[in-house]
């Protein structure tokens, strides 16, 4: 399978916003220090475009095996990021934008299982509010 790199808007042609914690931004800034403004954050070993297949085979899959997470995929990390954002209390519209979903309903359909204990938390907060009076 051969391919070519495409630079431009994503397949939906809609911009995506991704929240990046400052500790990661600091690591990226350090990594890019002294590099040209258009430098890749993660270049191939000899420079240029990093190819997913090579990166999977040489870096990601061995790291996943070493962490005893054999079989995990980079796409699984997308789900993990969304799940962590939701667990941290992110607004579902923010998660929708982060993932590039067309609607919040789609995001809720995919990640609704993460909200299973929400009713218990609502009841607990209502109880706390009533007792505080």
Image (cartoon, grey):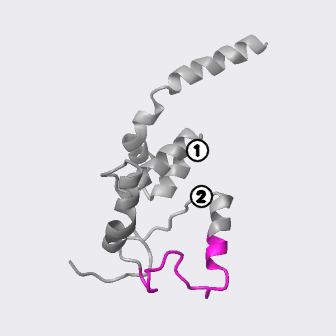
Between 26 and 4, the one nearer to me in the picture: 26
Query: Which residue is located at x 62 percent, y 70 percent?
Result: 28
The residue wearing badge 2 is 19
The correct choice, above or below, for 73 with respect to 58 in the image is above
Which structural element holds mark 2?
Answer: loop
User: Where, quadrant-wise, is the C terminus in this rendering?
Assistant: top right
Q: Which mark is residue 33?
A: none
**Bounds of the magenta segment:** 28-49
Q: Please, is residue 29 above or below residue 38 in the view?
A: above
Q: Give the residue furthest to the left.
A: 1
| Residue drawn at (31%, 83%) of the image | 4
Nearer to me, 121 or 31? 31
Residue denoted by label 1: 90
Secondary structure of the residue carrying numbered label 1: loop
Q: Is 29 inside the magenta-drawn segment?
A: yes
Q: Return the disc, 1 or 2, that comes first in the chain's sequence.
A: 2
Residue found at x 55% / y 84%? 39
In the displayed structure image, the side of residue 104 where residue 68 appears, left or right: left
Question: Along the line of sight, which residue is nearer the eye, 86 or 73?
Answer: 73
Cα–Cα gap, marks 1 and 2 = 10 Å
Quarter of the image where the N terminus is located: bottom left
Residue 71: where, in percent of width, then height?
30, 52
Where residue 92 appears, as percent x and y from the top left, is 52, 45
Q: Quadrant of residue 130?
A: top right
Please indicate whether residue 28 sits to the left or right of residue 13 in the image.
right
Left or right of 11, for residue 115: right
Q: Residue furthest right?
A: 133
Tell me if mark 2 has few (under 14), some (14-19) or many (20+) residues whose alpha carbon lies within 10 angstroms of its own.
Answer: few
Is 32 contained in the magenta span? yes
Percent of width and height locating residue 66: 39, 54
């Amino acid at each position: 399978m051969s391919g070519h790199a495409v630079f431009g808007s994503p397949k939906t042609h809609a911009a995506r916003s991704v929240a990046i914690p400052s500790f990661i931004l600091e690591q990226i800034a350090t990594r890019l220090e002294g590099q040209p403004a258009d430098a890749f954050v993660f270049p191939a070993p000899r420079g240029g475009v990093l190819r997913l297949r090579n990166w999977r085979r040489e870096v990601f899959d061995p790291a996943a095996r070493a962490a005893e997470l054999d079989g995990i995929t980079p796409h699984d990390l997308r789900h993990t990021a969304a799940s962590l954002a939701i667990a941290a209390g992110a607004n579902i519209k923010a998660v929708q934008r982060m993932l590039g979903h067309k609607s919040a309903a789609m995001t809720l359909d995919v990640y609704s299982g993460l909200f299973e204990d929400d009713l218990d938390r609502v009841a607990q907060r209502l109880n706390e509010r009533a007792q505080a009076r």
